[in-house]
Structure formats: structure tokens, C-alpha cells
């Protein structure tokens, strides 16, 4: 048969029913929610807020470090009027209150510095005719700096000669005392970034395997960081094994913190991880600015978070050998243990894992 002329071709039926109506606002919203544009749009605002909070957190904590309550040892004559005048002038110059702790001997006060219970020692002699000021750059270079800078004008104002001595100077390769902060920062960030990469590229890992691989990259990563800082760059002479283990424990703790949050918040786990470890933890760690110069609340909170615990443990390992404290290790171990426990208990909610398959169901 010959084809019909165009004017005689059957015409399609006009659209009718639900298929023919234009999409409503509800239809468009439903489609938008199912598309990749919704999470992308949410991320636009989250990233903008994160950028602002990041700048605010670090600027507020570290841009203008100001002394608050500085634990300071005092030895020598307790009742010397000139000592009181010197302390008062020092507090005025520092614009801070010295939290004075009295020691019977200078050796006891120096031991307190070794144990990082105080940041400086005022040794008053000859009825206040002379003051020896002992500081410790290793305890916090910013705290030692404010004492050192305040001493000459206070001496001139009170007429009391002052001799300043740094009991624990920083190593020559690290004159600003920032290497420990940087290596701890690397351990924190690579710790949770490693867990993120496992969740993306090794999603099929079961819970025990995920923990095992987190331990593995923490050990290798800690070794690499310590080797670069010490053996390659020579920035700081580390007690190698102890520093390695501190870095590895830091990386593992931070990796498991993300894994824990991933269990509960899934694709949004980066938000609480970033907030806890980067926005709050790193500026409050005391690595770049000594704790007495941080805002009081932030300085106290920072010691209970993995970045602050890592910096504390590393400082003591490098500069105060023989005076290591258990507290920072308890903090790191506590975060690791709690994170592992919560992840393990609710592991069925974690978005990763490949499950198990009965043997009889295996392909023949």
C-alpha cells in the first residue's frame, strides 16, 4: 500500500489526564530532592559557614594572644614589700593576673616547671633588691616571650634589677616552637582524612577490618611524620619511638572519631568531625599559643580534645623527658576507645561493610 498523504496521516491524541498536566511546585520540589542538586546546594551553604567559622576560630584564639591567669612560681622572701611592688608592676605590664604559687626553694620551683605546672619563677633575694626571672620557652614560647618582654620596663619602673634565664630553650631547628604543633596538626588531619578515604575507596570493609586498617595507616603515617620532621628536615630532635607512638595514637583517635560520626550521620559526618577537631581542637591545643594566653574556656577545653592532648604529650616527650604525664594519653585513649565502642555497638548503621554470605549460597 502506498503511504497516506501528510494531511491524511493519523494525528496523535492530545495529552490528557495526569501525564498531560504541567508539573506543579510540589512535583518540582520532589524531583529536586531526589537529584544531586539538593546536597550540592546544602554544601554551598555549609562550606561558606565552615570558611567563616574557620577564620573566626583561629583569629579569635591565636591572632592576638593575651595573658589571663598565668601560673607562676615565687621563691625567696615572701613578705618583702618590694616583691609585692614588682609583682604588681608585672601584672600591670602583662595585663594579666599572676597565679602565684610559693615554693620553699628555687629547685622546687624549677621542678614544677619541669612538670609543667607553672610557666615562670620569680626568685626574690636580698629583701627584694634583686629578682631572678626563670622562664621556659619549651612550656610555651608565647608565655615566655610576654614575661621576657615585660621584665625590662618593670625593672625600670620599680628600680629592681631583673635577670632573665630560659631554663628550657627551644631547639635550634625550631626557634618558634611550632614544629610540634605542625606535626600534631598533620596527625589530626590525616587521621580523619584517612578514615574518609577508607569510607569512599574501601567501603566494603567490615567493622573489624576497618579498625585494623585505621591502625595500619596510623602506624605508618605516624612513622612518616616523625621521620620527616626529625631525620629528613632536622627541625626537632625527637625521642623517636615515643613521638611516633603519640602521632600514631593521635591519627588512630581522629580516624575513629570520624568513623563514629559516620555511623550516625553518614555522608554529613565531616561536619561534626571538622568542628570538633579543626575548628575547636586545633586552635585550643596550645601548640601555637600557650594555654595561659588563650581565651580561658577555650584553653581548658582544648586539653580534653585529641589535638591538645597530642601537643601536650609531644611537648613533654621532646623537652621534659622523665616528666611525662598520663593525662594526655588518657584523653587520646579515651576518645579512641569511646569512638571504637560506639562504632562497634552500632556497626549495623554504618554505611560501609559488605556483610557475610552463607557458604551454601556461594556460587558453584
Image: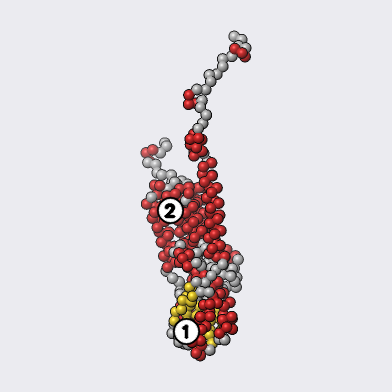
Residue at x 57%, y 74% (from the top left corner): 145
From the top left corner, tell me how far across and down residue 219 is, in percent. 49, 59
Residue 358 appears in the rendering: yes
Q: Quadrant of residue 256?
A: bottom left
Residue at x 50%, y 26% (from the top left corner): 19
| Circle nearer the viewer, 2 or 1 | 1
Vertical position of residue 37 compared to residue 285: above or below:
above
Residue 318 appears in the rendering: no
From the top left corner, tell me how far across and down residue 106 is, in percent. 47, 84
Residue at x 40%, y 47% (from the top left corner): 349
Q: Secondary structure at mark 2?
A: helix
Separation of marks 2 and 1 at Cα, in angstroms:
49 Å
Q: Total label count? A: 2
Q: Secondary structure at mark 1?
A: strand
Mark 2 = which residue?
Answer: 260
**How many residues crowd around disc 2 within 10 Å: few (fewer than 14), some, or many (20 or more)?**
many
Quarter of the figure with the C terminus: top left
Left or right of residue 186, residue 115 in this image? left
In the picture, the disc for residue 75 is: 1
From the top left corner, tell me how far across and down residue 315 is, in percent. 50, 70
Left or right of residue 214, residue 52 in this image? right
In the picture, the disc for residue 191 is: none
Quarter of the figure with the N terminus: top right
Please tell me which of labels 2 and 1 falls first in the chain: 1
From the top left corner, tell me how far across and down residue 89 is, in percent. 53, 80
The foreground one among 314 and 284 is 284
The foreground one among 266 and 330 is 266
Amino acid at each position: 500500500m502506498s503511504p497516506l498523504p501528510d494531511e491524511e496521516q493519523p494525528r496523535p491524541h492530545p495529552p490528557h489526564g495526569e501525564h498531560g498536566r504541567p508539573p506543579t511546585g510540589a512535583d518540582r520540589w520532589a524531583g529536586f530532592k531526589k537529584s544531586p542538586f539538593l546536597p550540592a546546594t546544602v554544601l554551598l551553604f555549609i562550606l561558606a559557614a565552615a570558611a567563616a567559622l574557620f577564620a573566626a576560630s583561629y583569629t579569635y584564639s591565636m591572632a592576638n594572644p593575651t595573658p589571663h591567669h598565668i601560673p607562676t612560681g615565687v621563691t625567696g622572701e615572701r613578705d618583702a614589700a618590694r616583691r609585692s611592688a614588682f609583682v604588681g608592676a608585672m601584672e600591670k605590664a602583662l595585663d594579666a593576673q599572676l597565679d602565684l604559687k610559693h615554693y620553699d626553694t628555687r629547685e622546687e620551683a624549677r621542678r614544677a616547671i619541669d612538670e609543667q605546672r607553672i610557666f615562670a619563677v620569680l626568685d626574690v633575694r636580698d629583701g627584694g633588691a634583686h629578682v631572678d626571672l626563670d622562664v621556659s620557652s619549651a612550656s610555651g614560647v608565647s608565655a615566655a616571650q610576654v614575661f621576657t618582654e615585660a621584665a625590662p620596663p618593670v625593672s625600670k619602673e620599680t628600680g629592681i634589677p631583673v635577670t632573665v634565664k630560659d631554663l628550657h630553650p627551644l631547639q635550634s631547628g625550631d626557634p618558634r616552637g611550632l614544629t610540634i604543633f605542625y606535626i600534631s596538626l598533620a596527625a589530626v588531619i590525616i587521621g580523619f582524612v584517612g578514615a574518609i578515604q577508607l569510607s569512599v575507596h574501601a567501603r566494603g570493609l567490615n567493622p573489624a577490618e576497618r579498625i585494623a586498617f585505621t591502625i595500619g595507616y596510623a602506624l605508618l603515617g605516624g612513622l612518616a611524620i616523625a621521620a620527616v620532621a626529625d631525620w629528613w628536615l632536622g627541625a626537632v630532635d625527637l625521642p623517636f619511638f615515643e613521638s611516633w607512638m603519640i602521632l600514631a595514637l593521635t591519627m588512630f583517635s581522629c580516624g575513629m572519631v570520624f568513623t563514629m560520626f559516620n555511623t550516625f550521620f553518614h555522608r554529613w559526618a565531616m561536619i561534626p568531625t571538622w568542628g570538633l577537631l579543626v575548628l575547636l581542637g586545633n586552635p585550643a591545643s596550645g601548640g601555637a599559643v600557650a594555654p595561659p594566653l588563650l581565651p580561658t574556656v577555650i584553653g581548658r577545653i582544648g586539653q580534653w580534645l585529641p589535638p591538645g592532648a597530642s601537643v601536650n604529650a609531644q611537648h613533654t616527650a621532646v623537652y621534659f623527658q622523665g616528666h611525662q604525664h598520663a593525662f594526655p594519653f588518657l584523653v587520646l585513649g579515651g576518645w579512641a576507645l569511646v569512638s571504637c565502642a560506639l562504632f562497634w555497638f552500632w556497626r549495623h548503621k554504618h554505611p560501609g561493610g559488605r556483610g557475610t554470605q552463607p557458604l551454601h549460597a556461594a556460587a558453584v
